[in-house]
Image (cartoon, rainbow, N blue to C red):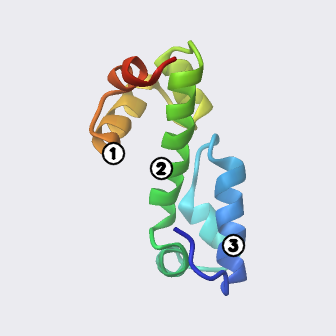
Amino acid sequence: KRRQHEDVLMRKVELALRDGFQKPFNMKALSIELGLSSSQLTRRFKKTYGMPPTEYLTALRLNHARTLLTESCLTLDQIAKECGYDNGFYLSRVFTKKMKISPSEYRRAHQV
């Protein structure tokens, strides 16, 4: 859930995450680019969006993964690459932990 966007810098971070969720994310590089420490970036982002940027990024990636699981026949490795993860094994671990269901079970339950 979004809060008021009084923090313009954090709005830029949010847009960067939305535009680049399919690529590797480097918190330290982003914070340096913005002239903040990693902890300052995390604190300000959490204050604005209610969660740390890494959690926000994970939510974006998992939303995309859910869409691809239900609307495509891509393999888990292909979906992982589309979602910014290195491989299907890691995506499966993250997906199962956050969604409380494995990607294959999710696909079977939601595919049309």
Q: Which residue is mark 1?
A: 98
Q: Secondary structure at mark 2?
A: helix
Residue 12 drawn at (x, y percent): 72, 70
Mark identifier at residue 50? none
Number of residues whose C-alpha sits closer than 10 Å to that of mark 1, classed few (under 14), some (14–19) or many (20 or more)? few
Residue type, mark 2 in image: Thr
Count the numbered circles shown: 3
Residue 18, position as x, y percentages in the image: 67, 53
Vertical arrangement, residue 80 with respect to residue 29, above or below: above
- In x, y percent, where is residue 54? 48, 58
Which residue, as the protein is rendered here, is positioned at the far front?
Answer: 112
- x, y percent for residue 31: 61, 71
Give the amino acid type for the residue marked by disc 1 in the picture: Lys
Q: What is the CA distance from the residue labelled 3 to the residue labelled 2?
A: 17 Å
Q: Residue 11: which disc?
A: 3
Q: Mark 2 or mark 3, which is nearer the start of the sequence?
A: 3
Q: Are marks 3 and 2 in contact (CB under 8 Å)?
A: no
> Residue sitting at 37 percent across and 37 percent down?
95
Q: Which mark is residue 58?
A: 2
Q: Is 112 drawn above or below residue 63 in the view shown? A: above
Residue 40, placed above or below residue 68: below
Q: Residue at x 51, y 68 (%)?
A: 1
SS under mark 1: helix
Residue at 48 percent of width and 19 percent of height: 111
- Three-letter amino acid code of the residue under disc 3: Arg
Q: In 3D space, how far apart are the residues under numbered discs 2 and 1 (Cα atoms)?
A: 9 Å
